[in-house]
Image (cartoon, rainbow, N blue to C red):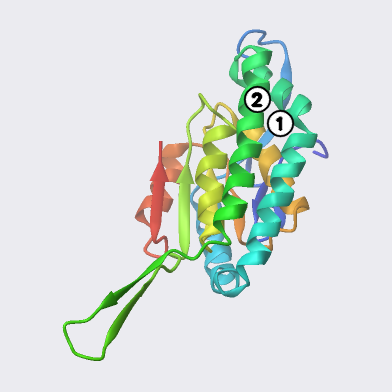
Amino acid sequence: MSDLKRNLIGGEWIAGTRVSENRNPSTPDDLIGLYARGGAAEAEAAVAAAGAAAPGWAAVSPQVRADVLRRAGDMILTQNEALGRLLAREEGKTLAEARGEALRAAQLFHFYAGEALRHPGEKLNSIREGVEVDVMREPLGVVGLITPWNFPIAIPAWKTAPALAAGNAVILKPADLTPGCAHALAEILAAAGCPAGVFNLVMGRGSEIGAALVAHPAVAGISVT
């Protein structure tokens, strides 16, 4: 199935064992595309890929992370019209609102590109004479992001961009009803130079993938809307 939109796991586009039709809710005859549907096995593979990639991503220069996020934001801007039309077709927003949401996603990636270069921390005086306390923030490691249908590119952006900026490896599970924008975002991040395994996309049912991510001992954090 050459036109199948696949999951992204460990830098590879994986078909999975099932397929979902993505249709326009206002015009059901309008087939937007065929999308791979993953399950617990794909979630497990994504966690393993993210776990392997997380230490390297956390260790790179913040400038590397900033550059990836900036390039992703630039690509979203370049593709704003196409992304807006895709969003309007699969989710049902007016085209003007859909374009605005895609623009917001680009702005989020640009903002967090800047945040990647900031190193927030604190220097405190200890109660022990001659001793100072340095407080530094570190990435969690592997994080699962579970997003809803109503903002199918903005919410993935405002979960993914800060997680990557902070040095985490990400597994995105978008809403089963609106996989198209999340898949487009995965393509953009891959093209922007995000290393294999640092960003993973697993599409499918929340009852299967979401449950597997939440219960997995190697997933250090979950963000769900």
Q: Position of residue 89 (x, y in %)?
A: 68, 17
Residue bearing mark 1: 34
**Mark drawn on residue 58:** none
Mark 2, Cα crowd under 10 Å, few <14 / some 14-19 / many 20+, is many
Q: Please name the residue shown 72% across and 28% down the image.
A: 83
Q: Is residue 81 visible?
A: yes
What amino acid type should be assigned to the residue bearing mark 2? Asn
Marker disc for residue 22: 2
**Quadrant in the rendering for residue 79:** top right
In-image side of 125 versus 176 (left or right):
left
Q: Position of residue 206 (x, y in %)?
A: 45, 38
Quadrant holding the C terminus: top left
97 horizontally vs 32: left or right: left
Label located before the other in sequence (2 or 1): 2
Q: Quadrant of residue 66?
A: bottom right
Classify 10 Å Cα crowding around label 1: few (below 14), some (14-19), many (20 and above): some
Residue in the picture at 70% in, 38% down = 184
Mark 2 secondary-structure assignment? strand
